[in-house]
Amino acid sequence: MKFSLELVKESSQEWVDTVMSDFDTFLQDHANCERKASAMAMSFVAKFPDRKEIIPELIETAVEELEHFRDVYAIMEERGVSLPKEMGQDLYVKALVGHCRSGREERFLDRLLLASIVECRGAERFRLVYEALPEGELKKFYHNLWASEAKHGNIFVKMALNYFPETEVYPRLEELNQIESVVLNELPLKAALH
């Protein structure tokens, strides 16, 4: 049984260059993404408290994302970079969520699968950042983060398979994965994770 997915479209070298040219802004966005990821995991707990099979893993994921936020914030402090005054909307996530179906069960499945795709995209981009950074502590940090985020993509698919058959999960995952490539293609380049 496969829990991961191959992204349809790879991030561009132009995106990497944009991040490397304004790394402090990227750090601010990265910190915000970690906070949002933690909140997203806990929102599943709040909205679906009856899904007891996945609550422990959701809590663990939320804690891990919050630890990532702590670690990114420590790097920001070292560099004299402040948190932005406002988190602002993530246009990438907003566009993806716009493709969720509206029925309670369908939306639950779509949100889990989108969480998987977003985490896989984050892992891919952390790998690209790691590869582009010069040797040092920052490079080591993004290497470790890449490994951690890669497993998050898998757990949301695994969670979905607790409640939905493979014949429903994998075709919908592929549909949303195709949608994600279009959304990514339409985003303006900026020093941000998405």
Image (tube, rainbow, N blue to C red):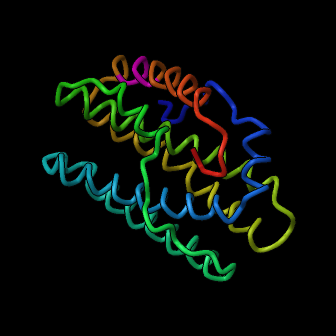
Across and down, in percent, residue 102 comes to 21, 25
- Total number of numbered labels? 0
What residue occupies the far right of the structure in this picture?
A: 134
**83 above or below 167?**
below
Would you say residue 140 sits in the magenta stretch? no
Across and down, in percent, residue 93 comes to 44, 40
Q: Quadrant of the C terminus?
A: top right
What residue occupies the far front of the structure in this picture?
A: 85
Q: Is residue 146 left or right of residue 95?
A: right
Residue drawn at (18%, 46%), measured in percent from left and top? Answer: 48
Across and down, in percent, residue 154 comes to 48, 42
- Where residue 99 sits, quadrant-wise, is top left
Residue drawn at (71%, 61%), measured in percent from left and top? Answer: 23
Across and down, in percent, residue 12 comes to 74, 35
Magenta stretch, main secondary structure, is helix
Residue drawn at (55%, 31%), measured in percent from left and top? Answer: 5
Would you say residue 172 sits in the magenta stretch? yes
Q: Is residue 42 left or right of residue 185?
A: left
Q: Is residue 132 left or right of residue 126?
A: right
Name the one closer to the observer, 43 or 155: 43
Residue drawn at (59%, 49%), measured in percent from left and top? Answer: 193
Q: Is residue 5 visible?
A: yes
Q: Which residues are magenta?
A: 169-173
**169 above or below 24?**
above
What residue occupies the far left of the structure in this picture?
A: 50
Q: Is residue 157 visible?
A: no
